[in-house]
Image (spheres, rainbow, N blue to C red):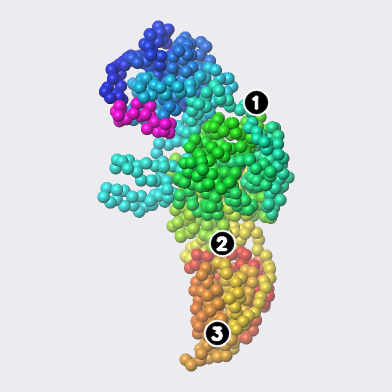
Amino acid sequence: MENSFNVNPQIFRPTCHSISVEVWHENALTKTAVQSFWNTVTDGVIGMAPAYGSKCALTTLALSSKSNVLVIRISVSKAGKKTQNQGNRSPGRILLRELLLDQTIVKTAFKMDKLAAALYTDIGLFIANGVDLLSTGKDERQSLSTLMAVLGGERTLNKSKVVKLFEQEEKDSGNTTDIASQAWASHQAALLERTSPVVATSAKINTHVLDEMHLTVLAKIVRDADRLVALKPTRQKNEVEKRHSEKQGKLELTSSRFKTRIMTTHGSNQTIEIRTVGQRGEQRISAKVTNEEKCIWLPAEQVSWFNTSSSTIPIALSFPSPRKLNASQRQAVNTILSNEDAHRIALIHGPPGTGKTTVIAAAVTSIMASRDYDRTIWLVAQSNVAVKNIAEKLVDVGFLGFRLLVSKDFHFDWHEHLYQRIEKTVIRSDDFPQSVVAAERLLLGSRVILCTLSMLSNQKLIFSRFLAPQTVIFDEASQIEVGDYLPFLQRFQSTLRKLVFIGDDKQLAPYGHGDIPELRSIFEMPHLRDGAVFLDTQYRMPVPIGNFISREVYGGRLKSEHPIKAMSSCKFVDVAAGHEEKSGNSWGNLREVSIAVSLARIFNSTGKAYRVITPYDAQRSKLENALKAANLPWEDRCFNVDSFQGNEADYIILSLVRSQKIGFMKDPRRTNVMLTRCKKGMVILTSRKFVEGVASSSLVGGLAKAWGLKASNWIEALSVLNARAAERVHDMPRMPPSRLLNLMQTLVDGAEFSLVRIPTTKVLELDITADTFTAFDHPRPIGLSPGFSSTGKLLALAIADDKQCTIVEFNVRAAPGYGRNRGGRDDKPSLHRNLDDLQQTILCRPAGELFAFDMAPLSMSLWGDAKLRVTNAVDIQSGLSAVDRKPLTAIKEILGKRNARFEGPKVAASFPVLPHLAIKPTATSGSDGYAAEVSTLGSGCPHRPRYLCPSSFEAILAGLEAL
């Protein structure tokens, strides 16, 4: 015996008598000690309490009678593993086995499910007549109110003592006195007047009657769930606004990331309650599930499926979508529609961009169009965002006959923008009715329900009572640990007809897989995985990226169909000066933040849809704050990789963060998600030395290697920052404009610029209508070019963007001129009301900027000759020419040496000197090229946060060629 002492439990009122405690190591446990304890069990009940060590393994077991507690220390091998087979050799364990299997004695524990699983997993012992006390309560099993009720109610308890006794939650960091007191409390709970009838009639846990194959699965599921709970931090860092107020003893904070994650509560001034939304919680297996009458489906198991009168009705494919399904998608849909027993459980393996939600939508529309009018379909996913994606796909194909069940916490304010398209189909949890009649009224005859797995498993979900799941399709099934299905399977086993699991075991694994490699999804079950239907064509990523992912991740089985085939769809930015920095439990890289903001500014100014993703949440927070500080769009722009699975964007800015250790990238599944989110292009921020060195063996390293050593595939970080500065600071080292143009070109469009022609039209002032300038209703750069008469009158104004040019000819008989040609005060310009459309649509456009050579004198001419104002007007030479203000100088600087063919006499003749000093009648005829040119030349001006747009640059070249 290691120790013996007396303990005086103080959780009840009044305080009870002292309890005798003996502590033994199992190897030293004698038959006499066990028999002595057994003799004190006079009421047919033994209370039990465990303590768990690393990886939630059993280290201590306490057994209690009314007056005595026997505490047993469990043997641990040198390798840190329990010696399960020692149960056949250790005398102490043999004695313990006899006690646990005695069917004349009821064994109680507050969490008997966990204890029963640990007894089998860790020391190879079974238990008979076990009672899970927390399952006998009426409230949530893990709540304090349930614990208090099980112990007889708050009136009979010293609440503070109860809270303190159970605050360690069975961890072996607690002392032996606490473990002994918990065991004694579980014994007392079974004998209380209020609880004893419930304990006597509750379902018993009898692991000795279960098939060991079944028990192994159950025990693993319970252990994995407990290990996941143990991984959760006890403290969580939250992001709040810097501004806060403290008035009348109340501290008011505003969450900067979420709007509904912090809620006010009543109680102590030092206590707040935090509600987390979408967090993966502990999935407990209740005593009912582990009853010997229940079974888990295994390969050799004969499953009885629910059948209806329509079970044999064939269902044909019916999918009203403009784009036809490919062969693999049709195979997947037909497998879902099949009534054959071989397809009762179907797995569909869908790599990124292969149309998994399309397959789901096609199956739904087909079933709803069939003669099987009784079938119900539940579309289920782990995350609310995945459920939302399915709903949006159904709307896209014109199917609105579904109902989307969402929690109040997720839907209210925080994510409400996600539901704007599907708002009419949404039923919030706080609107769930109490009666079946009211619930049926809300569904309006719908047989298609969308929700998360946690909601479907909720016992209080009323809709499933009269619309029981028959066909259930699980999206993101590769992220769901198999144990999470048990509550659902146990609850609906009598009505299920079809289970479909759609996912990709090459993308995100179940939560916690990095710390608990033993976690498995349905795709890790070989007897099911081998028959999965593979979706073999991706439509999301440009072909080069898709081909790389196919080769490196999917064994070359994944085909790509995409209009973008250029290697320039993926670019690397060498952030050589970037260094990883520890930030709490996460990582950040400030240099990459700066580069990402520069790129975001470029994409934003050119109207490109983009998102910024990163593996680390600390970096995500830094990126979001930096975008906000730069006055750039920041809401729903920055994501960590895990939260962005299932989403996509035209362009992805990817910040890898790490510069010394591989970190996140050692997980190929998460890296695969990270590299497969773009629809048009991707820019990867990292250190070239790091990617080609430490991280060369990672998927990102492989991507860099596949793109080769071409200089065009790597961009220097300084180049990006120079582009951001756009020469606003004249004393900084300037990037040659031709390089700046190439940088913008490859980052935004991923292609080389080319020479094209643009159509040009002329319109008289009198013929201007409200539709004349409709083509210019966009935020892209617009160039202006004036045409003057020999006396200085403004005769015409050319307006051009990258696609078209319009020349407005003014109806002016007399207009003020310049210098000695300038007229007097009595000279009145034409004020035709049609010019209002010109001013409102072009000159004072609500979005975007205007560019012109010598914008100041042009703006004066517009006012002096036509009483027209301009806003957001930029003078082009101020930003692009450091030598003089000749337009030709700026053109040469932009075009560079390789475009010397445009320095011919036609170009020079069009820009002999500044246009407001040398007035030639021929200037009007060339104003279309002039305007098309300045539509982009001006977008790099240093005093404006705008950049060269390569698509508009094509208009410049077209205009020059037309001269």
Choose between 884 and 565: the one closer to the eye.
Answer: 565
Question: At numbered mark 1, what does the secondary structure look like: helix, strand or loop?
Answer: loop
Provide residue 378's location: percent of width, then percent of height.
Answer: 59, 41
Provide residue 113's location: percent of width, then percent of height.
Answer: 47, 25
First to last magenta residue range: 138-160
Instruction: Tell me which label, 1 or 2, sits earlier in the chain.
Output: 1
Residue 302 appears anywhere in the view: yes
Q: On the rendered image, what quadrant is the N terminus found in?
A: top left
Question: At numbered mark 3, what does the secondary structure look like: helix, strand or loop?
Answer: loop
Provide residue 751's location: percent of width, then percent of height.
Answer: 65, 59
Identified at 58% across, 46% down, the residue is 445
Q: Which residue position holds label 2?
A: 607
Residue 907 appears anywhere in the view: no
Provide residue 494's location: percent of width, then percent of height.
Answer: 59, 31
Q: Which residue position holds label 3?
A: 832
Instruction: Tell me which label, 3 or 1, sits earlier in the chain.
Output: 1
Q: Which residue position holds label 1?
A: 302
Residue 156 highlighted magenta (yes or no): yes
Give amino acid for label 1.
Gln
Q: Is residue 502 placed above or below 732 in the rendered structure? A: above
